[in-house]
Amino acid sequence: MNTIYDENEKKHSQMIKNLKELPQIKAPENFDYNLMTRIRNKNFSSFEEERKHFSWGKFLAPSAIVVTAIILFFIFLPPSQEINNSILVQPQRVDSQSIVGSSNVIKKENANLSQRSNSPAAPASEAAIPKTRTRLPINNPRAISLDDYISGGNINQKEIERGNVVKSGNEPAEFDEFFVTEKPDQKTLEKYRAKIDSIKKAQMRADSLKRMRKMP
Amino acid sequence: MNKQLTESKDEELIKEFQDNNTLEAYEILVKRYKDPLMNFVYRFVGDRDVCTDIVQDTMIKFYLNKNSYRSFAKFSTWIYTIAANLAKNELKRRRRRTIFSISNSDDEKTPQIEDKMFLAPDRSADGEIKNEIIQRALMKVKPVYREVVILRDIQDLSYEEISDITGLAIGTVKSRINRGRTQLQKLLKHIYRD
């Protein structure tokens, strides 16, 4: 390793010689006098200036402002989750017509899907169509009557745990929304009752027919 | 001046100055080191007035911070370190000024290497001009290399001393000297032909 440096010295020998021969620069004659005068008069202005250049106050003041601004930013800025909070949004008016309407839409969609599955080009088209999950306005099993929940009159009180209402973490909350209890109009009620009665009657007839067939 | 003090070693003088605040010891050290430091700083900065100020500041710093010297180190390396740091700060300040100033007054101060083509052969042989050319070329060498080349080839310090002054490992010092010399040789190719 040293030989490399020795070779280098040999290579630059002429230049090194010239560098050594450069004239020696000497201090001016009044150098000592000026220096001692500065020391006696305690004239250390250049060093005081240097000290002024860097002071902790100068350094800390802007950094304190920046830190305060960051803290305030985190305190007062509402998190993005809260912006889209469905509770803060005015509740959607839910009425029986919308439920009926939405159930009709589902029926139509199911009919379309069954038609597609029967057609020969179904597998290809199925892959092309993204699977969408239709959502009812109210997720009945998880939905909570807000009035009942508050008054404690809910029958399924045990099922409604706190975790169902408010859920933390990254998982999407299972709780969908509160619904507002509204008294449905009389006509709609009668319509639904009639439907239920006809279904029950049909079921009873079907049962009686089955029994008849079984009888010897 | 006290004859005993004049014949004392640097380390003895600084100890005397530290222990008894003897101004005479300080003055002797200033006398011993003002010229070598002037030479070193001038070759590094390339401006005589600035160089005088830096050496003055070095001596003031030595006066103010005498207790920061520790007896296990050589006094010469300690004072060279102070001077080198101040000289580097001056270069940094200049660079900052060059960046931020609209009218670049430092351009006038930037040494330019004379081209051999513009020099008559008799002038080129002239020692004074050669020295000027070498100084200007030195100013073109990167400061990290320039510092070690000056300390080694002009100030004649050992690798160990340079290592103490710069705080670099001896291997790094050697390689930097090597690179510095190569850079300088390239800049002075019209003077030195391989």
Image: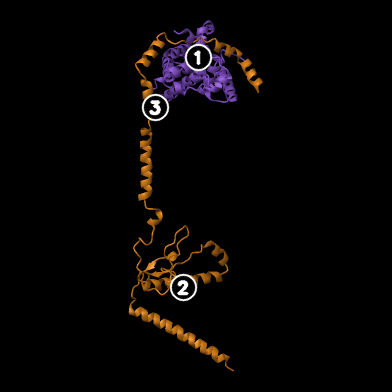
A69 or B23, nearer to the observer: B23
Q: Position of residue B67 (x, y in %)?
A: 45, 22
**Residues packed near mark 3 inside 10 Å, few (<14), some (14 to 19) or many (20 plus):** few
Q: Colour of chain B?
A: purple
Q: Chain of mark 3?
A: B
Say what secondary structure mark 3 lies in.
Answer: helix
Residue picked out by circle 2: A107
Chain ID for orange:
A
The amino acid sitting under disc 1 is Gln
Evaluate whether label 1 is on the same chain as label 2: no
Say what secondary structure mark 2 lies in.
Answer: helix
- Quarter placement of the N terminus of chain B: top left
Residue picked out by circle 1: B135
Q: Residue furthest front?
A: B20
Residue picked out by circle 3: B100
Residue at 38%, 67% in the rendered image: A178
Q: Residue furthest top?
A: B122
